[in-house]
């Protein structure tokens, strides 16, 4: 099975939920299948910042996209490289970020095994 970097980018995240698959306002619906893992460099976070990270997916083909998982990071991070678990995705998924407080520059890579 090949490993690849499927999506990558940088964004000054603020109050707009930002899609990591399309690098636009989101969430969007990516339909490529595989095992995916997100890596986010959140070293820009400082005291008072709050970053919301969300994973969306559909249960079955054609179903409504729903929130599958949410993580909240607060303040400067002792571990500035945030790494998700690996997820089997395929139907209409997306990872998004939103700055609940502050403006946070986030660098990301979504890696794929397929």
Image (cartoon, rainbow, N blue to C red):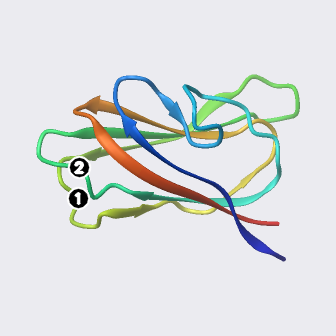
Splitting the image into 4 quarters, where does residue 102 fall? Answer: top left
Q: Is residue 24 above or below residue 84?
A: above
> Which residue is located at x 67 percent, y 29 percent?
28
Where residue 86 appears, as percent x and y from the top left, is: 62, 63
| Spatial CA span between label 2 and label 1 | 7 Å
> Which residue is located at x 72 percent, y 68 percent?
4
Would residue 98 appear left or right of 63 to someone viewing this image? left
Nearer to us in this view, 24 or 89? 24
> Which residue is located at x 75 percent, y 39 percent?
30
Where residue 7 appears, as percent x and y from the top left, is: 65, 53
Would residue 109 appear left or right of 30 to someone viewing this image? left
> Which residue is located at x 58 percent, y 37 percent?
23
Nearer to us in this view, 13 or 35? 13
Q: Nearer the viewer, mark 2 or mark 1?
A: 2
Total marks in image: 2
Where residue 39 appears, as percent x and y from the top left, is: 50, 61
Q: Which mark is residue 77?
A: 1
Would residue 111 appear left or right of 114 to someone viewing this image? left
Q: Which mark is residue 16?
A: none
Would residue 46 appear left or right of 35 to someone viewing this image? left
The N terminus lies in quadrant: bottom right
Mark 2: few/some/many CA within 10 Å (<14, 14-19, 20+): many
Q: Is residue 28 above or below residue 109?
A: above
Identify the secondary structure beneath mark 1: loop
Q: Is residue 107 above or below residue 72?
A: below
Q: Name the residue tied to disc 2.
A: 45
Mark 1: few/some/many CA within 10 Å (<14, 14-19, 20+): some
Splitting the image into 4 quarters, where does residue 14 fall? Answer: top left
Identify the secondary structure beneath mark 2: loop
Sooner in the amino-acid sequence: mark 2 or mark 1: 2
């Amino acid at each position: 099975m090949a490993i690849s970097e499927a999506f990558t980018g940088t964004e000054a995240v603020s109050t707009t939920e930002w899609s990591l698959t399309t690098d636009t306002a989101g969430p969007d619906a990516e339909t490529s299948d595989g095992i995916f893992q997100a890596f986010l460099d959140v070293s820009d976070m400082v005291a008072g910042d709050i970053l919301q990270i969300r994973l969306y997916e559909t249960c079955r083909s054609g179903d409504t996209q729903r929130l599958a998982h949410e993580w909240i990071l607060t303040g400067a991070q002792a571990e500035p490289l945030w790494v998700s678990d690996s997820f089997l995705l395929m139907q209409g998924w997306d990872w998004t970020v939103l700055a609940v407080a502050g403006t946070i520059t986030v660098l990301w890579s979504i890696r794929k095994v397929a």
